[in-house]
């Protein structure tokens, strides 16, 4: 999400290759490690071993590319701007600033700018999703109780 990175949509050829690669790699999704042999168009080749969780990240990337989506990888400990955090939560920046000022999401100030840990933004998003799911379950239960009363 850094301003220096340019997000590029995959070409149709890359989308198709991602689909093929994803199908091939998915056979190894449940292993604790995988050995890969690489051969580049420059003639270089190497063997390497990846932990299973890294392979899962690669599968997630390929799944998005196969849908034609651009992707960005961001370490969870990375700080993001308030605009980037607002985009992740699908809210306006002023609404996000209100959440920060209320203490809903931790932040720190760098000069006049607020910085938020990506992990804290993702934790907040997960927490609100769980609360929303719980509220919907309660509404569904109430609705069923009302229907049974007739």
Image (cartoon, rainbow, N blue to C red):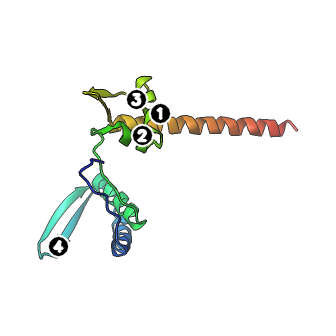
Discs 4/3, front: 3
Discs 1/3, front: 1
* Residue 125 position within the rendered picture, expressed as x and y whole percent measured from the top left: 45, 38
What residue is shown with label 2? 86
The tally of labels here is 4
What residue is shown with label 1? 95
Looking at the figure, which quarter contains the C terminus?
A: top right
- Residue 63 quadrant: bottom left
Front residue (pair 127, 85): 85
| Residue found at x 33% / y 70% | 21
Depicted 50 relative to depicted 92: above or below: below
Q: CA distance from mark 2 to mark 1?
A: 8 Å
Front residue (pair 122, 20): 122
Say if mark 2 contacts mark 1, CB within 8 Å. Answer: yes
Disc on the earlier residue, 4 or 2? 4
Under tag 2, what secondary structure? Answer: helix
Q: CA distance from mark 4 to mark 2?
A: 39 Å
* Residue 92 position within the rendered picture, expressed as x and y whole percent measured from the top left: 46, 39
Q: CA distance from mark 1 to mark 3?
A: 12 Å
Say if mark 4 contacts mark 3, CB within 8 Å. Answer: no
Front residue (pair 59, 36): 59
- Can I make out residue 59 in this image? yes
Say if mark 4 contacts mark 2, CB within 8 Å. Answer: no
Disc on the earlier residue, 1 or 4? 4
Q: CA distance from mark 4 to mark 3?
A: 44 Å
- Locate residue 100 relative to residue 142 in the image: left or right: left
Under tag 1, what secondary structure? Answer: helix
Disc on the earlier residue, 2 or 3? 2
Q: CA distance from mark 2 to mark 3?
A: 12 Å
What residue is shown with label 4? 40
Disc on the earlier residue, 4 or 3? 4
């Amino acid at each position: 999400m850094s301003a220096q990175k340019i997000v590029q949509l995959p070409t149709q050829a890359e989308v198709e290759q991602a689909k093929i690669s994803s199908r091939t790699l998915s056979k190894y999704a449940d292993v604790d490690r995988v050995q890969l042999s690489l051969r580049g168009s420059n003639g270089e080749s190497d063997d390497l071993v990846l932990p299973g969780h890294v392979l899962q990240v690669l599968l997630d990337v390929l799944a998005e590319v196969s849908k034609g989506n651009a992707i960005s990888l961001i370490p969870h400990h990375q700080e993001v701007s308030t605009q980037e955090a607002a985009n992740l939560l699908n809210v306006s920046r002023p609404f996000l600033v209100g959440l920060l000022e209320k203490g809903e999401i931790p932040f720190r100030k760098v000069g006049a700018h607020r910085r938020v840990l990506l992990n804290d933004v993702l934790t907040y998003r997960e927490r609100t999703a769980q609360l929303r799911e719980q509220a919907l379950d309660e509404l569904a239960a109430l609705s069923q109780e009302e229907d049974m009363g007739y």
